[in-house]
Image (spheres, rainbow, N blue to C red):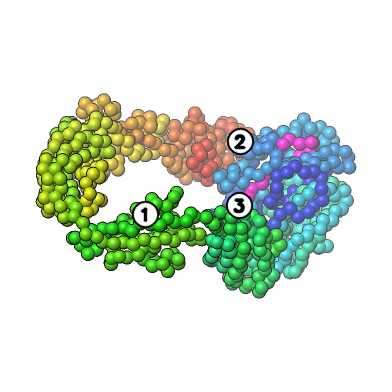
Amino acid sequence: MWKYFLVFLFFGFSSTFAQNIELYTQFNGRYDYTAIGNSMNTVENGTTAPCVINTSSSATLVLEDTQTVVAAYLYWAGSGTGDFDIELNGTPISAERTFSVVINSGLTDFAAFADVTAQVTATGTGIYEVSELDISEDIAPYCPTGSNFAGWAIAIIFEDPNLPLNQLNVYDGLQSVPTSLNIQLNNLNVLDNEGAKIGFIAWEGDASIAVNESLRINGNLIGNPPLNPSNNAFNGTNSFNGGTLFNMDIDFYNIQNNISIGDTSAEIQLTSGQDVVLINNIITVLNSQLPDASVLMDEVIANCGNGEVTIDFTISNNNSTEILPAGTEFQILANSVLVETGSIPQDLDINESWQGTMTLNLDPSIINYDIEILVDPGNLIPEFVEDNNAASIFLEFENFPDLPIFPDLENCLEETDNDLFNLTQQIALIPGADATNVQFFTSQEDAENNTNPIPYPENYTSPSSPQTIWLRYGNEFCYKIGDFNLERISCTFPDASPEISNIQGECYDREIQIDFMVSNNESTAALASGTEILFFADGIIIGSVFTPTEIPMNESWESSSSFSLPENLVGDIEIYMIVDPDNLVNEIFEDNNEAFVFYEMKNLGPLVELEPLLTCNEGEKIGTFNLTAQEFVQNQSNSTEISFFASYEDAIADFNEILETSAYLSQPTPQPIFVRYEELGECYNIGSFFLETENCPPFVPQGFSPNADGVNDTFEISGLYDIFENFEISIFTRLGNKIYEGNNKIEEWNGTCNTGLSSSGDLPTGTYYYVLNLNDPGYDIITGWVYLNR
């Protein structure tokens, strides 16, 4: 018999063939791994064993709550040139890497790899089945020598905050062991040998054959008796659960006493006096200590005129367990081009930082730069985290245009000593200006330093006349500064200010009457007759009126006018009025000529879409709902009359009202419900929402008693039948024999067999294991025990 070894962890995806075992990748952190798998052999192979290979088998993965899956890799192997398209839990899997080797007899064996991280992360703890692995047409030449085999395994790499800081080295290749093989493992960093281990997956292990079969680490014979004797390391066992397998081993070994602190390499030595051994992958798990360089930009100071940029930055060694050595290189790049290099002048202890400053001379004709700082750019220093070694900033060298000569701004002084100025009107004089890049200041120093900008430049109160205002246009790196004066002058103008006092309208009537007033307060002249007043409804002009006479200073004119609202306006409508809409009248204040109120149009508006109600599926997507729990209904006042209907037509006609609102049994969901709501004595409106059901978690009992007494005679799982319509359930004995298979079309388990060695007859009192696959993307596979009591 031949033996084939696979040791799992992180791999890439390019195809490869026979090659020496070499370092493939390295991981540092609180990592460890576990592995599951199963053979496709029906019995242990041999020259007299049946020449039969199954196409599917399964195994169970159990993860602790603190273990987070970071990678999962599926391997499968067997006799022949290979089957590279299989399924995992019914999902098609194609090989991403393949391996092949020809042994002395001239026969070929294969191995394959696929990344199944996403699938294992989603499934977690549960049963995993590999199927469609079919080499039945290839094994005939292998059976006479008892070398026919096939099997699979998944290596699951996980992170656990309770673990020490480990270094996981993954070595990759494919080498055979005719009689002996030495493999040199380099790139180790042994800082603490406590808990050090090495793991293997071996194919074709025979429990009864131990002819000069050994495994040594640095010359030391290792074993794990009685599970793995030192003279028969690969004997059909599983070190993770202590079980046995046909022609397959999933084993790991403690090598704490076979490797020393300070070692940077280790030697694996294998011998076999009868079996051909194939080594595919090796993994070591060693306690390790590493630094962790990270960088932050603290401040960037740029001279817009000549392209000079000064960068203050901080390099830290946080979240580390080792010193970051002096001389660690850093680089500064501008638009991905290297412009400066340097190195840390001192060792950085754990959680220690170093602050640096670099000055760059960039081309100012280039408008924008991406500035990036990289620490240890060649990854010459192993770190816990390799993706936090960079910091970047976007630098704008935009050449803003020269500013125009701004005119002075003037306001009248007749009524107040502190008139309001709109400084932002100067922005329109800057060609192509973006208002977000303009700020105003009361001193040139503040404008240069970009400090103390005027917070509300649209309504600025000037403390003196004249007063100089400075305008800054640009960004934090490039800018231009201009100035202008504020002055108060003598002037006589009216000041029209409107007010809407009331709006009257009947239900369903689009004719409204607006009561309004126009005042001429804060003025120094009368408002002329014939001044236009324009009215809008939700931005649509609905009419205008004109002042019939002039309005003297500090007096008002009150009036009412009727208007028709457009047909398409419903609900809350903004009624808006503006005096002198075309600015034909010079006024003291031009920003108080508007007034608006909201008017509720008493009319049946469009159907209001409300939030759905959700409850558990009671079967065939039917559920029981409390309609009054609808959030919209809960928010209505006590004076609002609420009623529910199954159709829009019934809601409009107020006919066939749903009376049982607190426990309404729905039709198959989603089902629309229409709610009619109206203030007492006012108009009504219609809203709608959907009743929706979801598949809630089923309740699995811990036992049942099939004794025909009419009580608890079946294994009744509440919330399962006609809800999870594609569910599958399997019942196993404590020895793992399947005795029952069920689904939505098969009656509940009544304590008898319907599959397996015996498909009929009552089962004895005892504990049985169930696996419930709801086949619902929102639920994982449910497993547990049930007690059958007769």
Label placed on residue 426: 1
Label placed on residue 90: 2
Residue 562: x, y in percent? 14, 35
Query: Which quadrant, please, contains the N terminus?
Result: top right
Residue at the image position 62 percent from the left and 73 percent from the top: 349
For residue 305, say whether it is visible: yes
Q: Residues within 10 Å of mark 1 (few under 14, many from 20)?
A: some
The secondary structure that most of the magenta stretch takes on is strand
Q: What count of labels does the image hold?
A: 3
Q: Which residues are magenta?
A: 66-84
Decide which of 151, 301 is in the foreground and name it: 301
N-terminal-most mark, 2 or 1: 2
Kindly indicate the quadrant of the structure image that contains residue 610.
top left
**Amino acid of disc 3:** Val
**Amino acid of disc 1:** Gln
Q: Vertical placement of 314 versus 492: above or below?
A: below
N-terminal-most mark, 3 or 2: 3
Q: Residues within 10 Å of mark 3 (few under 14, many from 20)?
A: some
Residue 436: x, y in percent? 42, 54
Tell whether position 346 is magenta. no
Read off the residue under disc 3. Answer: 70
Kindly indicate the quadrant of the structure image that contains residue 338.
bottom right
Residue at the image position 35 percent from the left and 57 percent from the top: 407
Element carrying mark 2: loop
Element carrying mark 3: strand
